[in-house]
Image (cartoon, rainbow, N blue to C red):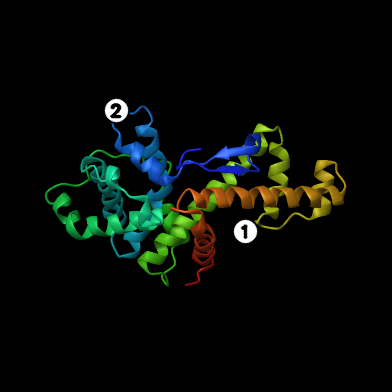
Amino acid sequence: MSEDSAQVPGLPGGRRFVTTHWSRLKLAAEEDSPGAAAALEELCRTYWYPLYAFVRRQGRGPTDAEDAVQAFFARLLAKKLLARADPARGRFRSFLLTAFKNFLANEWEREMAGKRGGGQPVLSLEELNPEALYVRDADPALTPDQAYDRAWACRLLATVRERVRMDYAQRGHARRYELLEPFLPGGDGQLSYAEAASELGLGEVSVRAEVHRLKQRYRTALRAEIMATVSSPEEVDEELRSLMAAVSGGP
């Protein structure tokens, strides 16, 4: 097993090899690599909106925020900063936010002098719709750093749910996941165990057991996703606490 992977039970095939965000960053820096573009796009999809939320909470408008994030990712590639990223620095989200702050402080005004758009976009914004997300989730009580953390946490939790959903779908249980997903943390809780049992044609005891297994798979997937963002397994629990605090609005 490479240093960028970890065996995680409870996911498709019984195991999953987790590629860290640090290794994706290094891959994105290898322009001739066939996986470079895909690695950069995945990182952009994960962190584009959190960085956007950070800039918007600083008081900049939607257009400036979009241009800033697009220009930042383009500059990461142009200046080969990706190749110099060091996992020993700790949490990936903290590294990226620090790099973004430095970019805004030292290069953003020069980037935008006499032009707009931040150069060639690295990711289409049509499906991201960042301003709609910001309007929906905006909390004036949050600092820019807190807005970034909350957006990161919500994006990560959505990714985890999607991975678990795909796992169920691959095993032919898409409908089962659809009915049981509301029982996961953050679910709407509108469906009762008895109602789910009726829909699935199972006994209520069986449905409770299914929900227990779903929650276990969810927790496993969540830890795996967190593991991909830190530099050592020992940081996973602390980062999980940070994630939950960000979602709940805590410190």
Q: Is 194 or 9 nearer to us in this picture?
A: 9
Which image quadrant is residue 109 in? bottom left
Seen at 68% across and 51% down, the residue is 216
Seen at 51% across and 61% down, the residue is 243
The numbered disc on residue 111 is none
Mark 1, residue position: 186
Residue 197 position, x and y percent, is 83, 47
Q: Is residue 2 left or right of residue 162?
A: left
Q: Amino acid at mark 2?
A: Asp
Residue 94 position, x and y percent, is 37, 58
Mark 2, residue position: 32
Residue 64 position, x and y percent, is 26, 54
Element on which disc 1 rests: loop
Earlier sequence position, callout 2 versus callout 1: 2
Residue 119 position, x and y percent, is 22, 41
Q: Is residue 152 above or below residue 80?
A: below
Seen at 69% across and 33% down, the residue is 171
Q: Mark 2 and mark 1 in contact? Answer it, CB < 8 Å.
A: no
Q: Is residue 60 left or right of residue 193?
A: left
Q: Amino acid at mark 1?
A: Gly
**What crowding class fits label 1: few (fewer than 14 Cα within 10 Å), some (14-19), or many (20 or more)?**
few
Q: Is residue 221 visible?
A: yes
**What crowding class fits label 2: few (fewer than 14 Cα within 10 Å), some (14-19), or many (20 or more)?**
few
Looking at the image, is mark 2 or mark 1 nearer the viewer?
A: 2
Q: Is 35 or 150 nearer to us in this picture?
A: 35
Q: Is residue 24 left or right of residue 180?
A: left
Element on which disc 2 rests: loop
Q: Is 106 or 196 nearer to us in this picture?
A: 106
